[in-house]
Image (tube, helix red, strand yellow):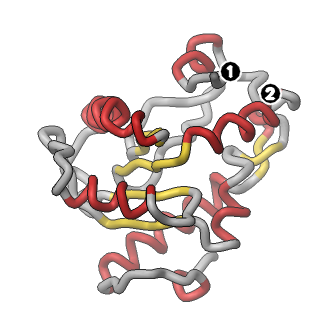
Amino acid sequence: MMSVKAQIYRFSMNESDKEIIESTLRWMTEFVELPHPVFSDLPICPFIKKARLVNQILFKIEPFSAPTEFDRDSAIMKSIYEFYNSEFEIMVVINPEKTAITAPETKELIDKLNRQISDLGLLAFHVHPEEDFNIDGLYTRRMPYPGFTVQVNSKLKPASDALEKTEYYKNWTAQQLKDFGIPRN
């Protein structure tokens, strides 16, 4: 089990935030980072463990809901600009309120966010405890809390190109590949 103490965080957090991040880290280390037959015995995300181990994940606890707006001065956009101007590879934004937003609302909200951050070369992926997205019956986006990740799009292309040379995507449907942007331009 991963402890938050093993990670170096660059912001102060209260006990509730620490518990939320620890829960997310457990999900990452006990599920996302483990090899799985659906992905030809590669981890669900083959790159997250390295990013975690070298402290390249910025965790943010930010409440949001369906009507959330992403104006420049909003807390989420400030976090995104902080990430954009940092050396971090991944930002994980976690909503501390599990029932503040549904899985479909989270997807819709992140679609709206992606339209706004695409000019920065960033891409967000939604997660939710009740998310229906699955590959061959494996629900890969059911993080313990609603949230999303933000990554630099130019770094995603070489990673997905490398995975295309393996059997990683063999159980993905054509629509899932398209929705995920594979192959990346």
Q: Residue at x 20, y 45 (%)?
A: 70
Visible in this render: residue 103?
no
Q: Are marks 1 and 2 in contact (CB under 8 Å)?
A: yes
Q: Secondary structure at mark 1?
A: loop
The answer to whether residue 69 of the structure is visible from this angle is yes
The three-letter code of the residue at mark 2 reads: Glu
Q: Which residue is mark 2?
A: 164
Image quadrant where one finds the N terminus? bottom right
Residue name at image x 17 percent, y 46 percent: 71
**Where is mark 1, residue-wise?**
183
Q: Where residue 162 sits in the image (x, y, percent)?
A: 81, 36
Tell me the crowding category of disc 1: few under 14, some 14 to 19, or many 20 or more residues within 10 angstroms, Cα based: few
Q: Label 1 amino acid?
A: Pro
Taking the view exactly as shown, the residue that stands out farthest to the top is 174
Q: Is disc 2 surrounded by few (<14), some (14 to 19) or many (20+) residues within 10 Å?
A: some
Q: In percent of the image, x 46 and y 49: which residue is there?
A: 149
**Could you tell me residue 90's position as x and y percent?**
54, 56
Quadrant in which residue 180 is drawn: top right
**In which quarter of the view is residue 116 placed?**
top left
Query: Would residue 91 be found to the left or right of residue 147 on screen?
Result: right
Q: CA distance from mark 1 to mark 2?
A: 8 Å
Q: Earlier in the sequence, mark 1 or mark 2?
A: 2
- State the residue in front, 78 or 148: 78
Q: Who's the residue at 64% across and 40% down the image?
A: 156
Secondary structure state at the residue bearing disc 2 = helix
Q: Is residue 52 left or right of residue 101?
A: right
